[in-house]
């Protein structure tokens, strides 16, 4: 403990220590008698150990903390030694949640969460204290979102807000979750499902400007890859002799499924061979010219050039179109293994009735 003399002759005490690898200090000011400073020095080791190892301090330490004046309590809280009971605003609660979640989330997932919170902020008072938000406030947010965003987007925002409050209750930062009882809806939106038939694929791929774009388009529509997976694909992943293609999947890596093996379908092989013949590449990334942003623009331009009406969910509907074909030709097991998701996800987001199903039903009717 250091003792500093002020110009007025009074002593001010400063306690310095190391917590989680960082040097910190608690300035006790001149209001606190030297006895309090000595007491804090006595208890400091117990408080540090509790924070470092996630344990509860001894009862006598807790009793001492409970009897501190509010100013000193806040200083200990800012130093990271104890939790303080200062009411949090809604943005502060969200910031704490994001700090806690950030290490375990991908950058794209974090950006998605941040976007959801910004969208919520446009439709409600974000200056409110987190514990003051009521079920009525949460319901009003749902009503406002129903007027301005799609049902899946609304569902995502409401579920993100509910997750924040659920976490806040676990951390004892808030007493209730006002979103718990608010119906949040579903991410499903069957109205945006669109099957891209093979003749449309051929027209669009013929309108692509170069071999790399044609290969990317084939990876999505014939290989059934996710948008990000095409930019992870490497020439080393193509087994020409065994006619297999290993798909690297960052999205499912955390669940232990960082890759899957799909057939090197004839049309996919044709486009990849054309690109390999042009570039002479045998190693490294398959996509070297196009980026995620430029690929979207280029595919949209190819669709327009082919005279085909643009469909929603550009890449997802290419992937779901292939999922439907594989399911019908090879069954549920192959569809799940080659497209890379569970049967439930397939039913909810990928598989749907086609026009050909209705036509077949009519022909087979006896």
Image (cartoon, rainbow, N blue to C red):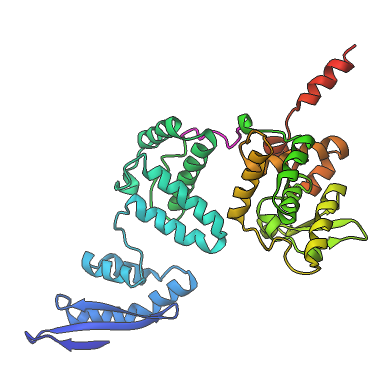
Left or right placement of residue 129 versus residue 201 in this view: left
Q: Which image quarter is the C terminus in? A: top right
Q: Is residue 63 left or right of residue 69?
A: right
Near-viewer residue (174 or 331): 331
Residue at x 40% of width, y 71% of height: 58
Tell me where residue 63 appears, x and y as whole percent. 32, 67
Res. 252 visible in picture:
no
- Side of 122 relative to 73 (left or right): right
Is residue 61 depicted above or below 112 in this figure? below
Bounds of the magenta segment? 182-189
For the N terminus, give its image quadrant: bottom left
**Vertically, is 293 above or below 132?**
below
Q: Which residue is painted at 75% across and 27% down in the image?
A: 353
Residue 62 picture location, percent across and down: 35, 67
Out of 54 and 317, give the one closest to the viewer: 317
Q: Residue 2 is drawn in which quadrant?
A: bottom left
Residue 205, how many percent across, how many down? 74, 45
């Amino acid at each position: 403990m250091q003792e500093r003399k002020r110009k007025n002759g009074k002593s001010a005490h400063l306690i310095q220590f190391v917590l989680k690898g960082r040097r910190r200090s608690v300035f006790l000011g001149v209001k606190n008698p030297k006895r309090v400073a000595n007491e804090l020095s006595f208890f400091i080791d117990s408080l540090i150990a509790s924070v470092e190892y996630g344990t509860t301090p001894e009862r006598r330490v807790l009793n001492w903390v409970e009897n501190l004046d509010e100013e000193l309590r806040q200083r200990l809280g800012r130093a990271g030694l104890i939790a303080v009971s200062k009411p949090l605003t809604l943005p502060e609660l969200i910031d704490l949640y994001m700090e806690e979640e950030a290490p375990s989330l991908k950058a794209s997932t974090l950006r998605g969460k941040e976007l959801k919170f910004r969208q919520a902020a446009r439709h409600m008072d974000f200056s409110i204290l987190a514990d003051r938000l009521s079920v009525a406030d949460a319901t009003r947010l749902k009503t406002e979102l129903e007027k301005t965003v799609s049902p899946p987007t609304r569902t995502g925002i409401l579920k993100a807000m509910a997750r924040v409050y659920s976490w806040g209750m676990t951390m004892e930062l808030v007493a209730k979750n006002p979103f718990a009882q608010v119906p949040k809806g579903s991410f499903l939106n069957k109205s945006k499902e669109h099957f891209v038939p093979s003749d449309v694929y051929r027209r669009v791929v013929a309108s692509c400007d170069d071999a790399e774009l044609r290969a990317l388009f084939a990876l999505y529509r014939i290989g059934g890859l996710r948008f990000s997976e095409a930019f992870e694909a490497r020439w080393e992943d193509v087994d020409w002799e065994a006619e297999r293609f290993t798909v690297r999947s960052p999205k499912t890596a955390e669940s232990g499924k960082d890759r899957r093996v799909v057939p090197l379908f004839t049309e996919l092989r044709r486009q990849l061979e054309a690109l390999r013949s042009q570039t002479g590449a045998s190693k490294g990334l398959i996509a070297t010219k196009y980026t995620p942003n430029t690929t979207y623009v280029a595919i949209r331009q190819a669709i327009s050039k082919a005279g085909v009406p643009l469909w929603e969910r550009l890449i997802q509907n290419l992937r779901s179109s292939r999922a439907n074909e594989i399911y019908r030709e090879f069954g549920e097991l192959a569809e799940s293994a080659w497209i890379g998701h569970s049967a439930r996800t397939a039913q909810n987001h990928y598989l749907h009735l086609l026009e050909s199903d209705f036509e077949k039903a009519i022909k087979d009717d006896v």
